[in-house]
């Protein structure tokens, strides 16, 4: 009984020692970091599509709805980056950690555009203009990093 416990404790210590993500990164497991950033990206994407539908005229423009989506995108825009931690990166075109300065610059540029969305989304013309700019800042990062 005692040795079983001891073995479990040793195993636990080993797992902790070899885990690529540690508590310092703010995520308990690599999977948690991946799900975190994918969750954020997917929610941003849903709201970009809702705005896109209004901008194209597929859905009637509604300033309150547009601004609510825009506000969510602005808020979420700051979140994905902390989840790009070592040991959690799958297939990418380039490594966001090795190229941290460039990656941060692309993230910052995007955040600036995302934060301009809520005010712009008050009118259909404003939304159209700022949505295009924001969307191209998503794309310019994807072109270099996302596979
Ligand atoms: C600074 C870089 C950067 C910016 C800006 C960026 N992305 Fe991404 N995005 C990535 C990377 C890198 C991935 C690859 C997936 C991963 O490893 O998390 C990704 C993946 C995604 C995914 C797939 C998530 C999944 O489930 O696999 C979606 C959807 C997405 N991004 C949408 C967006 C949208 C919409 C915007 C702008 C509103 C945006 N991204 C802005 C870097 C960026």
Image (cartoon, grey):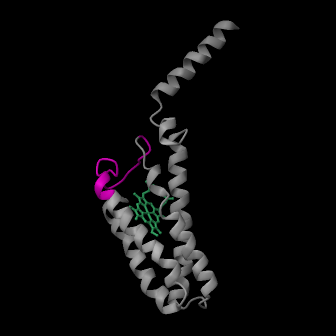
Q: Is residue 89 magenta?
A: yes
- Residue 141 drawn at (x, y percent): 35, 64
Residue most extreme to the right:
1
Residue 92: say if magenta.
yes
Can you name the residue that lies furthest to the top here?
2
Q: How far from the left and from the top, in percent, is residue 33?
A: 51, 47
Residue 51, compared with residue 103, is above or below; it is below
**82 or 56: nearer the eye?**
82
> Residue 8 falls in which quadrant of the image?
top right
Quadrant of the snapshot with the C terminus: bottom left
- Magenta segment: 87-103
Q: Residue at x 55, y 38 (%)?
A: 28
Measuring from the top left, give residue 100's x and y in whole percent.
32, 52
The answer to whether residue 142 is seen in the rendering is no
Nearest the viewer among 20 and 91 is 20
Q: Quadrant of the N terminus?
A: top right
List x then y, in percent, for residue 138: 40, 69
35 w.r.t. 66: above or below: above
Question: In this rendering, does residue 21 appear at all?
Answer: yes
Residue 101's quadrant in the figure? bottom left
Q: Main secondary structure of the magenta part?
A: loop
**Along the line of sight, the residue nearer the viewer: 102 or 2:** 102
Q: Residue at x 49, y 78 (%)?
A: 117
Where is ligand 1, by quadrant? Answer: bottom left
């Amino acid at each position: 009984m005692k040795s079983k416990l001891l073995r479990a404790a040793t195993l636990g210590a080993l797992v902790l020692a070899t885990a690529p993500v540690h508590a310092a990164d703010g995520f308990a497991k690599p999977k948690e970091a991946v799900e975190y950033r994918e969750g954020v990206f997917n929610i941003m994407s849903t709201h970009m599509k809702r705005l896109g539908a209004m901008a194209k005229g597929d859905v009637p423009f509604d300033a309150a709805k547009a601004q609510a989506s825009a506000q969510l995108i602005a808020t979420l825009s700051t979140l994905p980056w902390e989840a790009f931690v070592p040991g959690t990166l799958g297939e990418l075109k380039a490594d966001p950690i090795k190229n941290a300065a460039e990656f941060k610059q692309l993230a910052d540029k995007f955040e600036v555009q995302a934060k301009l969305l809520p005010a712009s989304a008050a009118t259909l013309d404003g939304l159209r203009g700022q949505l295009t700019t924001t969307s191209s800042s998503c794309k310019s990062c994807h072109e270099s990093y996302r596979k």
